[in-house]
Image: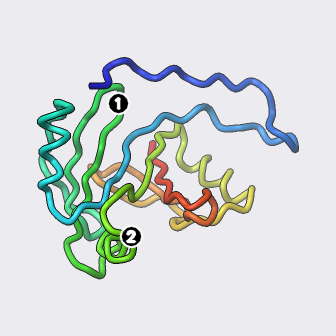
Amino acid sequence: MLRAPLPRVVRSSPLEGGAVPLPAPTVAHVGVAVRDLSAVAFYRDILGAEPRPPETADGATIVSLPLGGGVDVELLVPNSPDSPVGRFLERRGPGIHHICFRVPNLDRALEACRDHGYRLVDEDPRPGAGGRRVAFVHPKATAGILLELTE
């Protein structure tokens, strides 16, 4: 089981073109699309992660399993076939749906995305699981990976 925190990345110089990067983000969770919650068993029995009570957000039932170091796995079960997770499962089957990064300032991160021309799913933050402010960056802007940003 992962217990040690990951080292922080220190960035002190501007990026190419003079852009100054945001402070280093941390991974908050990995969202995994599943057809049912039988997947909880592996994370509980093998990795020792105790599931938190289910929540509902974005048309899915979400069960978070803390792995240590502030990183969770979120199992996402669609509540209907036409929900975002339901459509994902229909197209791709079970698997990694998104990666969520915790940033110090979500508004600033979205502004930086817009300034650099990165396509957003959410132009403004919205409530996500647990009532946290979240926003998604479109996979076409991130090499095919749906990224979620949260504070």
Left or right side of 22 for 138? left
Q: Nearer the viewer, mark 1 or mark 2?
A: 2
Q: Which residue in the structure is indicated by mark 1?
A: 70
Q: Residue furthest bottom?
A: 82
* Residue located 54% across and 41% down the image: 105
Give the vertical position of 133 relative to 58 (above or below). Answer: above
Q: Position of residue 123 (x, y in %)?
A: 56, 65
- Whole-angstrom CA distance, mark 1 to mark 2, is 28 Å
Give the vertical position of 134 relative to 46 (above or below). Answer: below
Q: Amino acid at mark 2?
A: Arg
Q: Secondary structure at mark 2?
A: helix
Q: Which residue in the structure is indicated by mark 2?
A: 92
* Residue located 40% across and 39% down the image: 28
Q: Secondary structure at mark 1?
A: loop
Residue 17 in which image quadrant: top right
The tally of labels here is 2
Q: Considering depth in this image, is 117 or 133 the residue closer to the camera?
A: 117
Q: Amino acid at mark 1?
A: Gly
